[in-house]
Amino acid sequence: SQTIHQWPATLVQPVGSPLSLECTVEGTSNPNLYWYRQAAGRGLQLLFYSVGIGQISSEVPQNLSASRPQDRQFILSSKKLLLSDSGFYLCACTRASGVADTQYFGPGTRLTVL
Amino acid sequence: AQKVTQAQTEISVVEKEDVTLDCVYETRDTTYYLFWYKQPPSGELVFLIRRNSFDEQNEISGRYSWNFQKSTSSFNFTITASQVVDSAVYFCALSEETSGSRLTFGEGTQLTVNP
C-alpha cells in the first residue's frame, strides 16, 4: 500500500514570502496526485491534480502553482504568499489505473501566513 | 454538477450512545462512488469506506455501519456505542465515473464524544 509524506509539517511565513511544500509517495507507481487546502473551518478545496509528470490541472485560479518534476513527487508553490493562503494543505494520491479510486491522504502541512 | 451535503455541523454525544451522521448527495451520473473519511485532531484524513452506486447493501465494520439508499440519495454513517476516540470531523465525499478519482467533499460533521 502507498505511503504519503509531506513536509514541512508546520510552517509560519510572512506575507509576500515564497512557499514550497513537498509531497512524495511510496509504494505505487504513476499515481494520480492531488493538493487540497482546508481553511479555518472544515471544507476541503481541491487546488490541483496531476495524472503524470509535468501534467497539472488547476481547479481554482489563485496565488498558488503546482509542479510534478518526478513520478512520485508533487510540489505546491507560491512566489508571494497572501494572508488568505493560511490553512492546512493536504496531499492525496490514487492509483493511476483506478476509476474513481480511493484517495489516500498524507499527514498535511499547517501553514500560517502572518 | 455533483454536490454533497452534511447538514449536521456539530454533534455532541455521551460515551456509549449511538450516533448517526447524515450525508445527502446530488449527481447526474448513474455510476458514482461514495466515501467516508475521518479527520482526528491530528489532521490526517483517514479512509473509512468506499461504496459504488450499484451496491446498496448496508455494511457493518465493528461499531461502524453505513446505510446507502439511492431512493433518497443518502449515505448515512452510524457509530454504535460511541467512544471518546471517535471524536473527530467526519467527511462524506462523492466521485463520479466521469470525473475520474476527483472527489467532492461535504463540509464535514464535527463529532464530540464526551466521557
Image: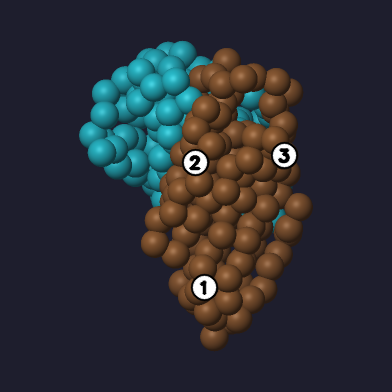
Chain colours: A cyan, B brown
Same-chain status of marks 2 and 1: yes
**Crowd rating for badge 1 (residues with CA inside 10 Å; few <14, some 14–19, many 20+):** many
What residue is pinned by disc 1?
Answer: B82
What residue is pinned by disc 2?
Answer: B57
Q: Which amino acid does label 2 sit on?
A: Gln
Q: Which amino acid does label 1 sit on?
A: Ser
Could you tell me residue B24's position as x and y percent? 70, 42
Q: Can residue A81 be seen in this view?
A: no
Quarter location, residue B87: bottom right
**Crowd rating for badge 2 (residues with CA inside 10 Å; few <14, some 14–19, many 20+):** few
The Cα–Cα distance between marks 2 and 1, rounded to whole angstroms, is 23 Å
Q: Which chain carries label 2?
A: B
The Cα–Cα distance between marks 1 and 3, rounded to whole angstroms, is 26 Å
Could you tell me residue A112's position as x and y percent? 60, 54
Examine the rendered structure and indicate whether residue B35 appears above or below residue B109.
Answer: above
Q: Which residue lies furthest to the bottom in this view?
A: B115
Of the image marks 1 and 3, the number of the one nearer the N terminus:
3
Image quarter of the C terminus of chain B:
bottom right
Could you tell me residue B82's position as x and y percent? 52, 73
Examine the rendered structure and indicate whether residue B85 appears above or below residue A79.
Answer: below
What residue is pinned by disc 3?
Answer: B72
Same-chain status of marks 1 and 3: yes
| SS assignment at label 1 | loop
Quarter location, residue B70: top right
- Nearer to me, B85 or B24: B24
Q: Which of marks 1 and 3 is in front?
A: 3
Q: What residue type is labelled 3?
A: Thr
User: Which residue sits at x=46%, y=48%?
Assistant: B59
Could you tell me residue B48's position as x and y percent? 45, 49
Of the image marks 2 and 1, the number of the one nearer the N terminus:
2
